[in-house]
Amino acid sequence: MIYATMKYQGKEDLFCVDPAGERAFLMSNFFDSCPAALDLRKGRGPSADILTFISAYREEWTEEIAEFFSARPELAISFSQLTVLAPIPRPARNLVCLGKNYKAHAEELKGQIFTDQLPLYPIYFTKPDHTVISSGDPILLHQTITNKLDYEVELGIIIGKKGSDIKKENAEDYIFGYTIANDISARDLQQDHTQWYKGKSLLSHCPMGPWIVHRSMLPLPLSLSIECYVNGECRQKANVSELIFDIPTIISDLSRGYELRPGDIILTGTPAGVGMGFDPPKYLKAGDLVECRIEKIGTLLNPVIPSGQA
C-alpha cells in the first residue's frame, strides 16, 4: 500500500494512494469500518494524522485496506482534487541522515569534505523538522548566506515501531515504508562550520515525498534505480543496492543504545553526481527545476527560487 498526506477541500488528511489510476482514498473510510482503528480518530475529527497511523499500524491492515478500497471504487478521489503534501509534514524528531554512503560519491568529494577515506562506520548527522517541504514546493536559495547550494537525491526509510539494539536480521520488521528525499546542502556552510548540521539545516532544504510506499511492496534486499535531474539533465544515476552500509546495517547500527520510534525518518545517503563533484561545480541557481526519482516509489519535483519570493 501507498500512504500520503494530502489536502482535500481545504483540509489536511490521510490517504491511501493508487498512483497508476491517479486517484486516492480517504483513510477515514477504512477507520469507520475497522473497530481496531476507531481510536485513531478520537479527538482528531474525521481522520488520523500519518504519525498516529504509523504508531497504531497492524500488519493485518495491509491486506484489509487493499481489500476494502478495491471493493469500493466509488470512494476514489481524483488527484485533480487533491494537493500532495510531504508524507510526514511535521516530523516528531530530527531526520537522521547518512553521509558518504555510496562509494562513487565518497570518491568524487575527495579533498573537499573532510576525510578522504571511505567510511569504516556510518557517518550520521541530522536535519531539523523545519527543512521538510513537499513535492512542488520551492527550494529557497538563501542567497544572502550561501552561494554553493547542492542537491542530493536519497532513499528515505520511515520507521514503523519502537526499538533499540535491533539485530540486522530483524531490521525489516521495524520499517514502515520508504519515500524520496532531497538532502539540499549548503556546501560553503558545511566547510565554514567544520561540521554538517548548519549547512544541512536551512528552511525548505529537505523536499520529501510524494508519499510512503509500505515495506510490503518493497521487500529487502532493495534493488531500485535512483536518479536526480536538474533542468532535465541527468546528474545522479545509481542503484540503492550500491549503498556502502545497507538498510539492515543502518538500522542495526543506529539503534545500538539509541531508541528508534514510529515515524522516525532516516535518509540513507546520496550517489555520485552532486553539483560539488563537477569541475567547475554545478550548484543550484534561481529558476532551476530539481527532479528526484526512485524506481517503484515515484518522483519528487521542486523549483529553486530566491529567498523572499516564496
Image (cartoon, rainbow, N blue to C red):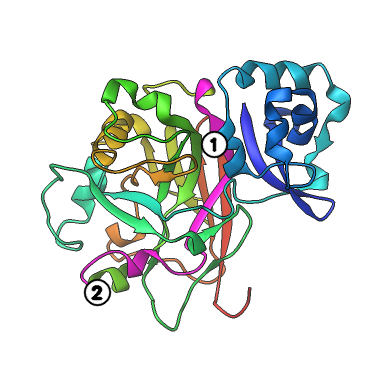
Kind of residue at disc 1: Ser
Residue 48, by quadrant, is top right
In the rendered view, tell whether residue 260 sits above or below residue 115. Answer: above
Does any portion of residue 186 appear in the rendered image? Answer: no
Q: Which residue shows up at 42% across the image and 60% down it? A: 184
Does any portion of residue 126 appear in the rendered image? Answer: yes
Return the x and y of residue 273 as percentages of the image width and height. Answer: 34, 50
Q: CA distance from mark 2 to mark 1?
A: 37 Å
Outermost residue toward the right?
Answer: 74
Return the x and y of residue 268 as percentages of the image width and height. Answer: 35, 42
| Disc 1: which residue | 55
| Disc 2: which residue | 193
Residue 163, by quadrant, is top left
Return the x and y of residue 295 as percentages of the image width and height. Answer: 50, 32
Q: Secondary structure at mark 2?
A: loop
Q: What span is colored magenta in the figure?
A: 194-216
Quadrant of the rendering where the C terminus is positioned:
bottom right
In the rendered view, tell whether residue 292 sits above or below residue 183. Answer: above
Q: Secondary structure at mark 1?
A: helix
Q: In front here: 165 or 180?
A: 165
Q: Residues within 10 Å of mark 2 (few under 14, many from 20)?
A: few
